[in-house]
Amino acid sequence: MTDEKLNLCSAATQGVYIKILCILHKQDEYGCIVLFKQNSNSISDFVYILSKLITFDKEEILSALTELIDRKVLTIEGNKLYQKRMVKDNAISLVRSKAGKSGGGNPNLNKQKHNNLFKQKTKQNTENEIDIENENENEIKVVIVYPFDSQNFKNVWEKWKEYKRDQHKFKYKTPLSEQAALKELGKLSNQDEETAIKIIGQSIANGWKGLFELKENTNGDRKSRHDKAFEQVARAHGFGN
């Protein structure tokens, strides 16, 4: 999908985009939201429809949809709002399905009828099709939105996942479940990156499975054995200063 264009959008816009993808995936016309009224094609019309389907208010949806259209991640054309890659992938899928019904897509069985449709793949025309063949056509690619943009935080989050996998045999089952954990971490840290990193370090130091609100030392400058153990483990995993 349009990863480079999407990465130029704000984190809030990317969050709305994930929800819109889920809706596009379920439409009768795959990848498109179609308005019933032919003369309705403004952004506000689509904002109204989306506000009934996703858990964002109209102002958030309007801001995100405007940015996604300006970045050419989504397109409004006539009474349709669509994602170009999804529409293109669906068209290829329909062509393959039709070819399969008429002989399994084997060029030897339909040499004359499908001569131009099923040519031997060349280096120039295979890149897009190989990409489609290697992924489930019904699977939506979800872009993880981090609460903080720094590479340091992303590295710490990867270490947290390694710790969960190695110590507790746990792995986030879907990108959406990982996204939910990141959102919860943002709330626990009050959207402060340093606090978020300390929360992760705290859980590792205590051998906890989950993330919890940071427990500050209330004993002044005198550090307890727990505090020292925390710092030792945190430094070993690359957390803190």
Image (cartoon, rainbow, N blue to C red):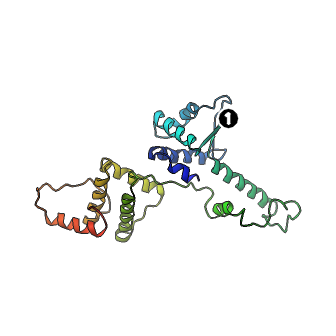
Q: Position of residue 121 (x, y in %)?
A: 75, 66
Residue lying furthest right: 112
Identify the residue shown where x is 54% and y is 34%.
47
Q: Quadrant of residue 70?
A: top right
The residue drawn where x is 65% and y is 32% is 36
Q: Secondary structure at mark 1?
A: loop
Asked whether 79 or 102 is in front, the reply is 79
Residue at label 1? 78
Q: Residue shown at 83%/60% (left/top)?
A: 116
The total number of labels drawn is 1
Label 1 neighbourhood size at 10 Å, few (<14), some (14-19), many (20+)? few
Residue 200 in the image: state x and y as whole percent: 31, 60
Q: Amino acid at mark 1?
A: Gly
Which residue extends farthest top? 39
Residue 164 x %, y %: 36, 66
Residue 48: name its quadrant.
top right
Q: Residue 227 appears at what percent x and percent y?
A: 18, 63
Please identify the quarter of the rendering in which residue 207 is found: bottom left
47 with respect to 94 (left or right): left
Q: Does 16 appear above or below 1?
A: above
Asked if 202 appears above or below 18 in the picture, the reply is below
Of the pair 171 and 84, the residue shown nearer to us: 84
**Left or right position of 87 against 224:** right
Which image quarter is the C terminus in? Answer: bottom left
